[in-house]
Amino acid sequence: MSDSERSSSTDEHEFEVTIHEVRRLKPGFYMNRTRVWYVDATGAQWLLCAPDAPLLLQPDGDELPRDAELVGRSGVRLVSRELAALVDRHFGSRRLAWPPGPGSTGGPH
């Protein structure tokens, strides 16, 4: 086997591996300068407050920014605490299918 044949056969078996570091977040409220998130007991992240919306409850599958810090309940507004209570009461034991399909409530049927 010549060198050119050997190098082409090894090229067929080469692959690239990408490793992503994922932070495992404790349940609770996270805040940075502009946003507030809630991480429920299942590890699901919910965006509660953003500059473009005064009030929202949106599942957030993106990784939290590095500057988001865990804060105590008293560190967030009452409305954010109430939204977190809704998450715990209605979605804490199951994942929300988001976005919901036509005629779907987003939960199990």
Image (cartoon, helix red, strand yellow):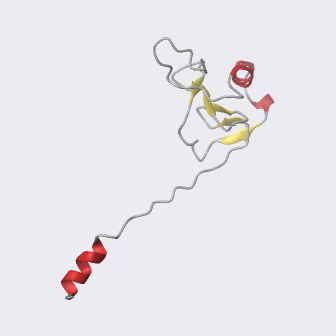
Provide residue 62's location: percent of width, then percent of height: 53, 39
Which residue does the image show at 50% across and 59% down from the upper left? 19
Picture residue at 56% right of the left edge, 43% below the top: 63
Residue 83, quarter of the rendered image: top right
Q: Residue at x 58, y 18 (%)?
A: 54
- Along the viewing direction, whichever of 92 and 53 lies nearer the viewer: 92
Rendered location of residue 39, percent (x, y): 68, 35
Q: Quadrant of the N terminus?
A: bottom left
Tell me residue 27's x, y (percent).
73, 38
Q: Quadrant of residue 90?
A: top right
Whether 9 is drawn above or below 76: the answer is below
In the rendering, at what x and y percent does residue 31 appear?
Answer: 66, 36
The residue positioned farthest toward the bottom in the image shown: 2
Residue 36: image quadrant is top right
Up-down relation of residue 40 to residue 86 (above or below): below
Is 39 situated left or right of 99 in this image?
right
